[in-house]
Image: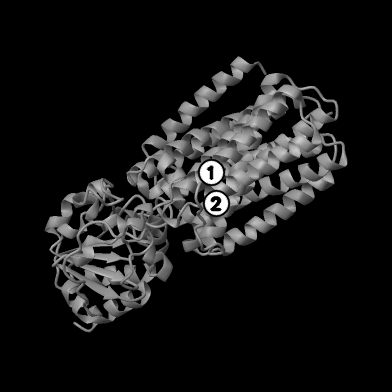
């Protein structure tokens, strides 16, 4: 990928991130931090590519660690966010 | 190779990136929040599954599945078991793992360069930058976890600490630049990683508990950034987009939190909280703290027209949220209007209190932010403060010499009566004397938050 294209992607992604979070009520700050923590778990994809293309023993060991850590990020992030958001209900919804 | 894989893999990553952004957006409203995480979860599943057939992956499938299984099971098990009050440190822990993964990716890329693989300068810069940031987020988050978990109680400070921190940070940068210019060798790469890890530890160790939410949020943003950079190295747009979106969103969130505490971010990072208390308690404290027993407090609340409950970390420690909600329902049945007021930095994370109240079943439309509730205190009969301290300290408005002067607070002191549930007479986390406790219309109810809430419930019930 050309550096300039990457720079455009970074720029647009940064504005998206700011825009998405700027009008969020304080009540959702913790779940949102937790949710964004889950989303950067996409690093798992990179870790898998690294391990899948590892050739030497050292690369395999470090790649294994990368996949292990990233999987923890993904699953832990999801479980914790899901548990938190499950509890958000309005008084209207509670009557169901 | 599976036919069409050159199309399927990028298409799946594209879909995942769209769904991540949509999911994060949906998480911004209480009504759609749960759908948001579900969407992001599906996106992650698609992205991970398609990576098994990624053109660059050509082996080690057994190791890959084993690593995913071990990491997933460990995180699943801990994530399901952890109490709601301990959520902040778990977020720190999982975030640290993500940072560590990004640093590990950088390490392997640089190891490949040592093995004769060629990388262009931009890619090396991205790998090195992602490596530094990821390693700092990794070790820093683990320290934050250890501190919140209570494994590391002491806030460790020494003279010239900031200079030492800066030296380690500068050394990391210098070694990073050397890797970029001269190419990595095994010794330099090892030193580079170790120094970055130590820098993360040193930066986090002196930061006190009250600032932890800001720090966790900052590391969350940093991990996002590291993931984005490593995404460039691996030519993976899904990682680039998701990483940078989180990096930017996390930075915004960190700013919001630092602003709520009226402290510039640099202040949080480079000066220990409550440093001013070494000069002795700030401000003139006149009068005494007047205590009240639970029965009298219950009577006051039961015959009030309006009660505002202000929860703080003490509620989390005492696990009092269920009892508080029971008390609220009891009072509401008697015709008392009860609402909750939450300061943006109450507890150990922004929204920490909201999560606990939600767990207890408090509908979120009874919960108000600082700006929405402050005007209501003068018309409120009783403000019930549960284990909150700095966020209700009027010194922030009245005493220019106070370290928290200028911080927006909940104007609890303007309520007609204030009852404060507190464990003891000490000054709490920040070591700042709280002027509220000495006001004429403030009464202290000493004890554990849960026990006192129970006592208040019994008190209200006995009136029937």
> Which residue corresponds to the image point at 42% horizontal and 67% vertical from the top-left?
B317
Q: Nearer the viewer, residue B294 or B77?
A: B294
Spatial CA distance of label 1 from label 2 is 8 Å
Tell me where residue B226 appears, x and y as whole percent: 61, 35
Which residue, given by chain and number where applicable, does mark 1 sit on? B219
SS assignment at label 2: helix
The circle drawn on residue A44 is: none
**Residue furthest toward the front?**
B159
Which residue, given by chain and number where applicable, does mark 2 sit on? B92
Do the residues bearing badges 1 and 2 touch, measured as CB atoms within 8 Å?
yes
Q: Quadrant of the C terminus of chain A?
A: bottom left
Q: Is residue B10 visible?
A: no
> Which residue corresponds to the image point at 28% horizontal and 68% vertical from the top-left?
B328
Q: Nearer the viewer, residue B300 or B179?
A: B179
Disc 2 chain ID? B
Q: Nearer the viewer, residue B113 or B23?
A: B113
Crowding around mark 1 (Cα neighbors within 10 Å: few <14, some 14 to 19, many 20+) is: many
Q: Nearer the viewer, residue B101 or B27?
A: B101
SS assignment at label 1: helix
Disc 1 chain ID? B
Q: Is residue B355 visible?
A: yes
Tell me where residue B157 appears, x and y as whole percent: 50, 54
Q: Quadrant of residue B460?
A: bottom left
Q: Are marks 1 and 2 on the same chain?
A: yes
Q: Quadrant of the N terminus of chain A?
A: top right
> Which residue corresponds to the image point at 22% horizontal and 84% vertical from the top-left?
B462
Crowding around mark 2 (Cα neighbors within 10 Å: few <14, some 14 to 19, many 20+) is: many
Tell me where residue B333 appears, x and y as whole percent: 22, 70
Q: Is residue B79 left or right of residue B208?
A: right
Q: Quadrant of residue B286?
A: bottom left
């Amino acid at each position: 990928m050309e550096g300039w294209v990457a720079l455009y992607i970074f720029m647009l992604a940064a504005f998206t991130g700011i825009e998405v979070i700027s009008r969020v009520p304080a009540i959702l700050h913790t779940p949102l931090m937790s949710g964004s923590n889950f989303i950067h778990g996409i690093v798992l994809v990179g870790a898998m590519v690294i391990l899948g293309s590892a050739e030497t023993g050292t690369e395999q060991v470090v790649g294994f660690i990368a996949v292990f850590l990233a999987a923890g990020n993904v699953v832990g992030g999801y479980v914790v966010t899901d548990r938190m958001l499950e509890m958000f209900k309005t008084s209207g919804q509670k009557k169901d | 190779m599976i036919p069409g894989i050159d199309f399927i893999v990028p298409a799946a990553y594209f879909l995942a990136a769209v769904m991540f952004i949509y999911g994060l957006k949906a998480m911004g409203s209480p009504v759609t929040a749960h759908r948001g995480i579900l969407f992001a979860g599906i996106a992650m599943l698609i992205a991970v599954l398609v990576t098994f057939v990624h053109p660059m992956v050509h082996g080690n499938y057994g190791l890959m599945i084993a690593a995913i299984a071990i990491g997933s099971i460990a995180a699943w098990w801990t994530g399901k078991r952890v109490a709601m009050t301990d959520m902040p440190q778990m977020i720190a822990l999982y975030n640290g793992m993500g940072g560590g993964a990004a640093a590990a990716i950088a390490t392997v890329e640089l190891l490949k360069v040592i093995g004769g693989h060629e990388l262009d300068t931009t890619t090396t810069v991205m790998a090195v930058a992602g490596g530094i940031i990821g390693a700092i987020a990794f070790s820093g988050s683990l320290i934050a976890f250890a501190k919140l978990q209570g494994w590391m109680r002491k806030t460790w400070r020494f003279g010239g600490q900031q200079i030492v921190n800066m030296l380690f940070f500068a050394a990391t940068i210098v070694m990073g630049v050397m890797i970029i210019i001269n190419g990595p060798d095994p010794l330099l790469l090892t030193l580079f990683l170790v120094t970055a890890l130590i820098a993360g530890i040193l930066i986090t160790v002196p930061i006190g508990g009250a600032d932890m939410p800001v720090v966790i949020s900052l590391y969350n943003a940093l991990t996002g950034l590291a993931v984005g950079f490593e995404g460039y190295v691996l030519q993976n747009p899904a990682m680039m987009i998701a990483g940078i979106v989180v990096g930017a969103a996390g930075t915004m969130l960190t700013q919001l939190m630092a602003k709520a505490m009226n402290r510039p971010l640099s202040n949080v990072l480079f000066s220990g909280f409550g440093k001013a208390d070494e000069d002795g308690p700030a401000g003139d404290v006149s009068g005494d703290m007047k205590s009240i027993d639970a029965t009298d407090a219950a009577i006051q609340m039961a015959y009030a027209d309006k009660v505002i409950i202000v929860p703080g970390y003490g509620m989390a420690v005492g696990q009092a949220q269920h009892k508080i909600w029971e008390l609220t329902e009891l009072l509401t049945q008697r015709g008392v209007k009860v609402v909750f007021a939450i300061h943006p930095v109450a507890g150990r994370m922004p929204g920490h209190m909201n999560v606990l109240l939600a767990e207890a079943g408090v509908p979120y439309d009874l919960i108000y932010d600082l700006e929405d509730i402050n005007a209501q205190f003068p018309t409120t009969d009783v403000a019930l403060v549960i284990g909150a301290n700095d966020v209700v300290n009027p010194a922030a408005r009245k005493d220019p010499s106070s370290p928290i002067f200028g911080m927006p607070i909940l104007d609890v002191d303007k309520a007609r009566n204030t009852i404060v549930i507190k464990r003891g007479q000490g000054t709490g986390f920040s070591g700042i004397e709280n002027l509220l406790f000495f006001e004429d219309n403030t009464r202290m109810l000493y004890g554990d938050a849960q026990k006192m809430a129970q006592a208040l419930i019994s008190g209200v019930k006995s009136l029937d």
